[in-house]
Image (cartoon, rainbow, N blue to C red):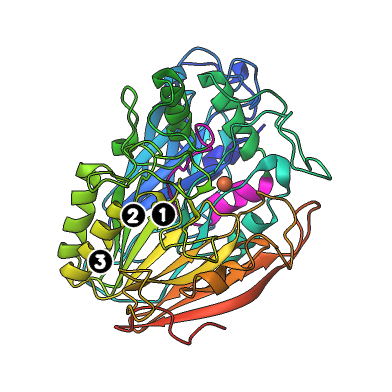
Amino acid sequence: MLSRRSFLAAGFTTGLPSLVPSADFGEPFTLGVASGDPDPGGFVLWTRLAPDPLAEDGFGGMPQEPVPVQWQVLADPAGRTVVRSGTELAVRDWAHSVHVTVTGLRPGRPYWYRFKAGPYVSPTGRTLTAPAPGTIGRPLRMAVCSCANYQHGYFTAYAAIAAEQPDLVLNLGDYIYEQGSDHLLGPGGNVRDHGGPEAVTLADYRRRHALYKTDPDLRAAHAAAPWVAVMDDHEVVNNWTNLIPAERRQAAFRAYYEHLPLRPAARPGGTAVQLYRRLRWGGLATLHVLDTRQYRDPHLCGAGFNDCPAPDGPSRTMLGLDQEQWLLDGFHRSRARWDLVGQQVFFGQRDRDPGPGRLVRQDAWDGYTAARMRVSEGWVEAGARNVAVLTGDVHAHWAGDLVLDYDDPAARPIGAEFAVTSITTGGDGTDVDPVTDPLPAVNPRLKLHLRHRGYLMLEITPSTLTAAFKIVRYVSRPGATAETAATVRLHDRVPGLGAATA
Ligand SMILES: [Fe+2]
């Protein structure tokens, strides 16, 4: 426990009216600190008080009462200059999580932050503000990640992301997995244990999120940079569509919000959560973050790879009408050098049938081809200068060209897709995969495929977008080093990868 003097030294006040005697809870910052969704004037700061993170009732060992949490934004990592400060009330209804919307800061620079609750001071996190509107400053260094199954391995790739000290971390979902301890990763079994059955209730989802944040590598990745996070399916249940019971969706959405640095607009109401949104990085990049789960039409033929005989009607939707219109409007209004579309499921065609048939994954955009065409034509008609789609979900690295007509070998690229591999899901990677290795031969638009765990590191300048495909060679034990297995570069006003693939 810190002495009165040590938290005075940290610059926090002592005169704050405390509604709870501090003796009523122990060290509460077990889940770390986080920041997210930066704009030119600020960002969101997050923490959650949980002295007993895995407490059975999902409340993290906190008392019933609200607890005031002081926060500070610092101009330097040592905390010599406090530039903003305030107090938020952490309440039991939201599992004593805290979301602070900070405004009025200077654009395009790093800041640091910390919290205090009772006598306890949190670790210090690093974050950034976005550049001023229209300006192009330093290159943007953005890490992209998805799919971190705790049972499948160690979060070594998160530690590597933390070490990169990126400007942004884009998390494309499967941040947690809902599966129970009995859900085994094939031969060799699980590396770690979820410690309970499949998450269904609010208490289950809260405990699962808390378990993930007990991992020091995940906490380090949050503390290193602001995150832009969006969910995929496993934050609720495998391959969910809006047919999943409302009560379960509500529980999963609420726990997701409680554990991520999301803006108040993303606070779930009823059975809906607003996660699609747009972030601008000056005049350099606009990031359109999509939600491909909540508003989609049901699968026509299940979620897996199959040759669906049912016709994909022209009105079927992946994004829902509102989000689709919002995206197309965004392409029209964007003045950025780079339009980045962060989303969950594979966008370009991936056909497993070497013959004339089409054996495609129905859960991905291949199962929603009319919607894919509307979105693709939308950015072409809008005259978007450079488009790159960033994708999660597939547990392997991929890079490919996007076209309007995948059956036309002469079709010119209209953009590129980079799909990021998993942090751990699938366990240790391989050099060969007999199922996916033939795909580039069948789909000449697919240029690069790697089967190890890892993340993507993008460096974006006005003239180039360079994607470093990072891999770790094992996750079944800690300590792998992150290697750059391939590098791909896009050039301003040259859609697609061309011959650029390394
Ligand atoms: Fe996944």
Does the stretch in magenta take in 53?
A: no
Residue at the location (47% across, 14% down)?
Answer: 65
**Circle 3/circle 1 CB separation < 8 Å:** no
Indicate whether 288 appears above or below 100. Answer: below
Q: Helix or strand or loop: what does disc 3 sit on? A: loop
Q: Nearer the viewer, residue 201 or 460?
A: 201
- Figure quadrant of the N terminus: top right
Q: Nearer the viewer, residue 404 or 168?
A: 404
Mark 2 or mark 3, which is nearer the start of the sequence?
3
Mark 2: amino acid: Thr
The reply to whether residue 181 is in sight is: yes
Residue at the location (84% across, 45% down)?
Answer: 188
Indicate whether 349 appears above or below 49. Answer: below
Q: Helix or strand or loop: what does disc 2 sit on? A: helix
**Circle 1/circle 2 CB separation < 8 Å:** yes
* Residue bearing mark 1: 366
Residue at the location (57% across, 33% down)?
Answer: 209
Estimate the spatial distance between the alpha carbons at disc 1 and disc 2, rounded to whole Å.
Answer: 6 Å
Q: Helix or strand or loop: what does disc 1 sit on? A: helix
Quick one: label 1, few (<14), some, or many (20+) residues within 10 Å?
many
The residue stretch that appears in magenta: 216-238
* Residue bearing mark 3: 132
Mark 3 or mark 2, which is nearer to you?
2
Mark 3 or mark 1, which is nearer to you?
1
Does the stretch in magenta take in 235?
A: yes
Quick one: label 3, few (<14), some, or many (20+) residues within 10 Å?
some
The reply to whether residue 28 is in sight is: no
